[in-house]
Image (spheres, rainbow, N blue to C red):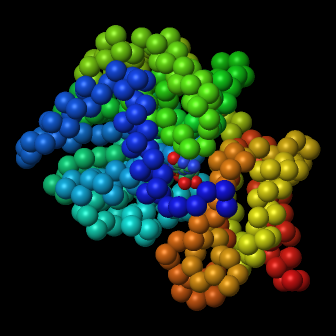
Amino acid sequence: MLRTGGPQDGGEEEEEEEEEDCPELVPIVVQQQQTEEEEGKPDPCAKIPVTIITGYLGAGKTTLLNYILTEQHNKRIAVILNEFGEGSALEKSLAVSQGGELFEEWLELRNGCLCCSVKDNGLKAIENLMQKKGKFDYILLETTGLADPGAVASMFWVDAELGSDIYLDGIVSVVDSKYGLKHLMEEKADGLINEAVRQVALADIVIINKTDLVAEEELIKIRTLIRVDLSNVLDLHSFDNLSGISLQKKLQHVQTTQPHLDKSIVTVTFEVLGSATEENLNIFIQNLLWEKIVKNKADSTMEVIRLKGLVSIKDKPHQVIVQGVHELYDLEETPVRWEDDTERTNRLVLIGRNLDKEILKHLFIDTVTKKKESS
Ligand SMILES: Nc1nc2c(ncn2[C@@H]2O[C@H](COP(=O)(O)OP(=O)(O)OP(=O)(O)O)[C@@H](O)[C@H]2O)c(=O)[nH]1
Ligand SMILES: [Zn+2]
C-alpha cells in the first residue's frame, strides 16, 4: 500500500545507510573489519560466532537478516528466530524468505544456509544447532522486538565458561528512523525498562533504518538521541573489545539496574477461514491503524505497534503478506500459491496495547468476511 518492493529493496537501503551513517554513529567499524578478516581464514576448529540482531518491533531486523542471507553466498549461516510464542506458527512462515520464497523450520536454503526458527528461548535451539555444527559457520540470532538483548546475550557468556563452541561476536541493533524516536523517548511506568533504549544501549553497532521515510532533520534528531543513549547509559565503548569480561560487566550493570519488562504490550493472533476483498481488508486495517476507532471492552483504544499477517485476497491466486508498523502498512503478494480454495485462510498477528482477541477476530469477520459475501 504505502510502500512497494520486497525485502531485498529494504536490505539494499540498509546497507547504504550502514555505510553512510554508521561510522558517525558508533566507533565500531574497526572491530567489524577485524571480525571480517578473522572470518576470511577458514579454521575447522574455530568457534562459531553468533551475532544478535535486535531492535524494536518492526524496526527491520528480518529485512536485515534476509539481506545478509542473500548476500553471503559463500557462508553457511544458521538463523535462529527468537520469536513470540503465541504467534510462532505464523512468525515462522513469515520470518525468513529468500529469493521471494518462504522457508519454514529446518530447511536447507539454496545457498546453503540453515534456517532454524524457535519459539522458545534460544538455548535449546543453540544446543540443537551445535549438533549440526559441521553444517554452518555462522549463527544469526534475531530477537523479538520486545527482547532484552542482555538476557539473550548473557546465555553466551554463561555458556562460554562451560567451554562452549559458540561465542558472541556482537549485538547489532536496528532502529526505525520513523518511529525510533517515539520508542526511545517513551516514558515507562515506574520501574519498567524501555526496551528500545536497552537495545540501543547494548548494541555494538546501530543501524538506522528506513531513512527513506523521514526528512533529514528527523534523522539528525534520532542520530543525536542514539549517541546520547550510547554514551550516557553505560559507558559502553570505554571497555568495549567484545571480550567476555567486558560484555559481562555491561550485562551485570544493566540487569541490576533495570529488572522489569513491560507487560502492557500483548500479542494477539487469530485465524479466519476464507478470502477477503482487498477493499474490506484495507477498511479493517485502517480503522485500526489510522482511524483508531477500535476499542476494547474497557473502552480503551487498541494501539497496534506491529501487525503481520498472511491473508487470502479474493481472486488473487497467491498468498498475500500484510506488514504493519504503527500506522504504516502494506500488502505484498508472495510467490506462494494457494493450492486449492479449501485451504484459503487469513492469519493475523497483532502486537500492541489494549488488544482484545475476540473483538478483533469478530471485527475481522464482520468487516472482511461478511461484507465480502454481500458484495
Ligand atoms: N520504507 C521502508 N520500509 C522498510 C525498510 N526496511 C524494512 N521495512 C519494512 O518494515 C516492516 C518491518 O520490517 P521487518 O524486517 O519485518 O521488521 P522486524 O524488526 O523483523 O519486525 P519484528 O520481528 O516484527 O519486530 C516491513 O514492512 C518492511 O518491509 C526500509 O528501509 N524502508
Ligand atoms: Zn522480524
Total numbered labels placed on residues in the image: 0
**Residue, x 70% and y 22% (percent of image)?**
187
Q: Is 3 in front, or is 175?
A: 3
Assign the C terminus to one quadrant of the image: bottom right
Residue nearest the observer in this picture, 183 or 123: 183
Residue 285 image point, x, y percent = 76, 59
Pinpoint residue 328: horizontal percent, then vertical percent.
Answer: 68, 50
Quadrant of the drawing holding the N terminus? bottom right
Residue 103 visible at all: no
Answer with left or right where residue 142 lies relative to residue 37. Answer: right
Which residue extends farthest right? 299
Where 140 sits versus 313, above or below? above
Question: Measured from the top left, where is residue 64 in percent x and y?
Answer: 42, 48
Q: Quadrant of residue 243?
A: top left
Q: Identify the residue shown where x is 73% and y is 72%.
A: 278
| Residue visible at 34% across and 10% down in the picture | 238
Residue 206 at what x, y percent from top left?
44, 31
Whether residue 185 is visible: yes
> Is residue 29 found left or right of 82 in the rendered image?
left
Is the residue 211 above or below the residue 65 in the image? Answer: above
When the figure is inspected, residue 311 is found, relative to residue 138, above or below; the finding is below
Kindly give the residue lying farthest to the front in the view shown: 216
What's the residue at 24%, 63% (across, down)?
A: 112
